[in-house]
Image (cartoon, rainbow, N blue to C red):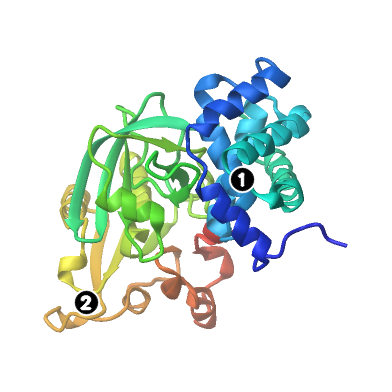
């Protein structure tokens, strides 16, 4: 019989409510408890990040992207600090700390089962994520609002983040500890190490809401380890590209354009940028600079709800993209779920080989 708590089980809801009442200062208590039981296991400065991430994984919902981000971060932490042999000690310290700060009868039963489930997930993740730091401290140096629900954040890591174009990184703000959300850097690696993040605030997005509406320059954020999304360029190929972006799905595709700009190699690139109307083209200035600087790059807006647009620009991004498709192109798509839902079957129905179609499937794993 499974020992997992069902997603809709009242125990999970109760544990999540109890966890929400735990003050972030409990992380200090957790570290002291762990230090008493196994001295030197976890650096004091990293205890808050570790405590909030593991607690959230234990009681949080099963939203696949959020869970994947937490597992990426914690898997790296367990490897980096060599914590796997001490998982039981860590779990006991976590439960003891939570029980002191949020007394609840379920911690002794449902809490233990939920922690076992989380620990199994972390062990699997630790075997896959590779070595390196679990998180990077970054400072917000620029926070722009090109539209009411979108922010462009430029952050500077305290140590260089080893990301590649097309990857995504988990992001967390101290305003909402323990909650990590995937974002794709919108730039290829820069000499100054800065990273540009594009964020749209969505109705149910607690992290995105804070990043867009509350975070200000000078604040600190945390970035987790970069993860592959299926959008990286194959270094062994130099095919022409058709890039299809919807909303802030533009970010990883713009990073690919910057990567090619550093070493064009004869490629020609067409970038279709989807939006509802012209005012929703939030990154228009940067895109205009790129197009003016590179004669191999063609940028085409696709406006789904703008009667003033030119006829060749009216329509959804994928439909406009197909007007620019050539058989020798690799196709990369990134955007909202509705845009991606039927993209692969639609392209395959037109005879485009599956190997030439690249979608960010791992965002939802």
Between 339 and 164, the one nearer to me in the picture: 339
Image position, residue 248 (x, y; %): 33, 59
Disc 2 and disc 1 in contact, CB within 8 angstroms: no
Q: Residue 268: in sight, yes or no?
A: no
In the depicted structure, whether residue 100 falls above or below residue 43: below
Image position, residue 240 (x, y; %): 40, 58
Q: Which mark is residue 27?
A: none
Horizontal arrangement in the rendering, residue 85 relative to residue 198 (left or right): right
Label 1 packing within 10 angstroms: few (<14), some (14-19), many (20+): many
Image position, residue 159 (x, y; %): 41, 24
Quadrant where the N terminus sits is bottom right
Residue receiving disc 1: 71
In the depicted structure, whether residue 235 falls above or below residue 48: below
Horizontal arrangement in the rendering, residue 63 relative to residue 280 (left or right): right
Between 333 and 38, the one nearer to me in the picture: 38
Label 2 packing within 10 angstroms: few (<14), some (14-19), many (20+): many
Image position, residue 282 (x, y; %): 21, 59
Residue that appears at 33% across and 43% down? 187
Residue that appears at 27% across and 39% down? 154
Q: Earlier in the sequence, mark 2 or mark 1?
A: 1
Horizontal arrangement in the rendering, residue 49 relative to residue 184 (left or right): right
Residue that appears at 51% across and 49% down? 20
Residue that appears at 31% across and 36% down? 155
In the depicted structure, whether residue 160 falls above or below residue 114: above
Quadrant where the C terminus sits is bottom right
Q: Residue 106: in sight, yes or no?
A: yes
Q: Which mark is residue 313?
A: 2
């Amino acid at each position: 019989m499974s020992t997992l708590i069902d997603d809709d089980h009242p125990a999970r809801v109760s544990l999540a409510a109890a966890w929400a009442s735990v003050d972030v200062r409990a992380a200090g208590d957790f570290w002291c408890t762990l230090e008493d039981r196994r001295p030197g296991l976890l650096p004091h400065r990293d205890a808050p990040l570790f405590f909030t991430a593991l607690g959230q994984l234990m009681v949080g919902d099963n939203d696949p992207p959020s869970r994947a981000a937490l597992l990426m971060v914690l898997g790296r932490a367990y490897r980096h600090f060599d914590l796997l042999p001490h998982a039981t000690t860590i779990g006991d310290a976590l439960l003891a700390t939570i029980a002191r700060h949020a007394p609840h009868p379920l911690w002794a039963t449902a809490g233990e089962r939920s922690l076992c489930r989380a620990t199994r997930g972390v062990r699997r993740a630790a075997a896959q994520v590779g070595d390196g730091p679990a998180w990077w401290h970054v400072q917000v140096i620029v926070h722009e609002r090109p539209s009411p629900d979108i922010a462009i954040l430029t952050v500077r890591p305290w140590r260089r983040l080893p990301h590649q174009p097309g990857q995504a990184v988990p992001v967390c703000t101290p305003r909402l500890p323990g909650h990590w959300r995937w974002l794709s850097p919108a730039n290829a690696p820069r000499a100054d190490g800065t990273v540009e993040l594009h964020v749209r605030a969505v109705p149910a997005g607690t992290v995105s809401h804070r990043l867009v509406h509350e975070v200000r320059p000078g604040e600190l954020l945390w970035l987790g380890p970069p993860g592959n999304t299926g959008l990286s360029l194959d270094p062994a190929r130099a095919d022409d590209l058709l890039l299809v972006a919807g909303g802030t799905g533009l970010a990883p595709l713009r990073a690919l354009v910057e990567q090619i700009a550093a070493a064009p190699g004869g490629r020609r690139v067409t970038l279709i940028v989807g939006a509802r109307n012209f005012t929703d083209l939030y990154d228009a200035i940067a895109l205009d600079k790129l197009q003016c600087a590179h004669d191999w790059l063609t940028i085409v807006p696709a406006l789904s709800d703008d009667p003033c647009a030119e006829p060749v620009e009216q329509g959804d991004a994928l439909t406009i993209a197909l007007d620019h498709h050539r058989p020798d192109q690799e196709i990369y798509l990134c955007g909202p779920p509705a845009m991606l839902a039927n993209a692969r079957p639609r392209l395959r129905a037109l005879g485009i080989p599956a190997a030439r179609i690249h979608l960010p499937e791992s965002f939802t794993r």
